[in-house]
Amino acid sequence: MAPFLPRRKPSRKGSMADVPKDLLEQIKELERLFTVDQPKLKEVTEHFVKELEKGLSVEGGSIPMNPTWVMGYPDGYETGTFLALDMGGTNLRVCEIILPEEKGEFEIIQSKYRMPEELKIGDSEELWEYIADCLQQFIEYHHEIEDLEAMRKVHKLPLGFTFSFPATQEYIDHGVLQRWTKGFDIAGVEGKDVAPLFEAALEKRKLPIKLSALINDTTGTLIASHYTDDTMQIGCIFGTGCNAAYMENCGSVPKIAHYNLPPDMPIAINCEYGAFDNEHVVLPRTPYDVIIDEDSPRPGQQAFEKMIAGLYLGELFRLALVDLHDNKNVKIFEGQDISKLRKAYSLDASFLSYIEEDPFENLSETGELFAKELSIQANKPELELCRRLAELIGTRAARLSACGVAAICKKKDIQSCHVGADGSVFNKYPHFKARGAQALREILDWPRGKRDPVDIQAAEDGSGVGAALIAALTIKRVKAGNLAGIRHAEGMV
């Protein structure tokens, strides 16, 4: 009897032998367009460092580099009970976080509430009323307190509010909304401080809550990740959008020099670096990137984000395929109705993920996906091209995303650290982490065969635990008399 041989894993290494010459030429051209080599990675990173510096200057630049008034990291010994409110595009999440005496530990209870679509385009007061209503339900359910006003006289629960929309902050407990994103478009809020609007709704219901900090999810990711791992020095989001936060010294931020803060005092900076290279100086844009920008609601903005964020990866793929189909010299999807493929933003990043995860040599799962989602019957050579295109787009996104991390490391002279990353692309897109790590090796010239000194890992919950920790840090500062960037310290302790 023949010895039992282990079954070979399905191979996804397709063969190009049966791909016609015209398609092979197109694959080569796509490789030329989407490949970012080592010299280009280094060029992008060098320009990125200069742009980070410019964003901190009085004059400013494309990258906002917003001071967050989070002055330093938690030491792991913060204690108390805190609320966190996370206002996202689809849900409202309310958390209660207990920080016990054990270093770096936390307990969390949470509830999610649906964010009704009509509220996103409705009236400002209705939005804040709804949020206050959810908070009231949460407290009453988890605390079984009948008399909220009586509780209010004894103790107000400090709250960290994750408000992940572009906002300018002169104080940690306030924020002026620059513009709505994520499908929100409520009149009369842009250009206004959202803190008093939120506090008025709390006051109306006599809720025992004190807004201690208004934060961005990226800053929360940095703080929450550092709380459980003190080698974390950068927090990143690679999802629908992209962003990073890190700890700067006040002396290196000329635009806050008038506050006369000690130069070595730390302050977290929310980079908002999706806006990197809005001037199109260095990023290797393809004709498809140009179309995405020109057809977007805000052309000329968020140039970096449009090349690497989940929202745009499927659209890049779609535009390239439509372009190839319409090219008379290329035979792809011949005689087929591609009307579904012509619909803008009909494919998202998960479509590319699925193609990249197809384990079969004949790409049968990719073929089924095209038939089901796009009503296209693709032959094997066409599927080979589609798979290579998905790999190229996914790889470019991961490699370019490493430039932002490398730029912060170079600017701060960080030789070794952990980076806490969150977001759907980082967590779910195949090979994203490995491809980003390879790009970091190429940019920072690490020796082969040794452990990577800068390691991007899954982050802690930034919008929940991070928000609570920042509320705790703010209260700690008030107790110590360090009131820089705090507007309403009264009632916090």
Image (cartoon, grey):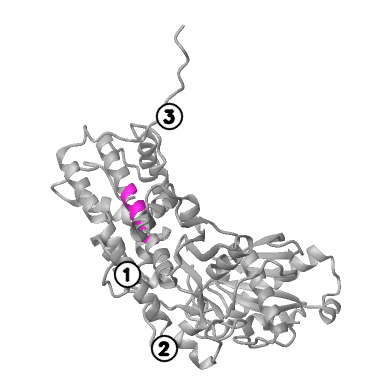
- Nearer to us in this view, 58 or 455: 455
Q: Is residue 437 above or below residue 471?
A: above
Disc 2: CA contacts within 10 A as few (<14), some (14-19) or many (>=20): few
Labels 3 and 2: the sequence-earlier one = 3
Q: Secondary structure at mark 3?
A: loop
Q: Is residue 381 above or below residue 40?
A: above
Question: Amino acid type of disc 1?
Answer: Glu
- x then y, percent, for residue 316: 32, 56
Q: Whole-Å distance between the Cαs marked 2 and 1?
A: 21 Å
Question: Amino acid type of disc 3?
Answer: Lys
* Residue farthest left in this picture: 329
Q: Secondary structure at mark 1?
A: helix
Labels 2 and 1: the sequence-earlier one = 1
Q: Quadrant of the C terminus?
A: bottom right
Magenta segment, which residues?
A: 390-401
Q: Assign the magenta stretch its main secondary structure.
A: helix
Question: Residue at label 2?
Answer: 58
Disc 1: CA contacts within 10 A as few (<14), some (14-19) or many (>=20): some
Q: Secondary structure at mark 2?
A: loop
* Residue farthest top in this picture: 1
Disc 3: CA contacts within 10 A as few (<14), some (14-19) or many (>=20): few
Whether residue 183 is visible, yes or no, is no
Question: Residue at label 1?
Answer: 46
Q: Are marks 2 and 1 in contact (CB under 8 Å)?
A: no
Residue 300 horizontal side relative to residue 214, left or right: left
- x then y, percent, for residue 426: 47, 55
Question: Residue at label 3?
Answer: 9
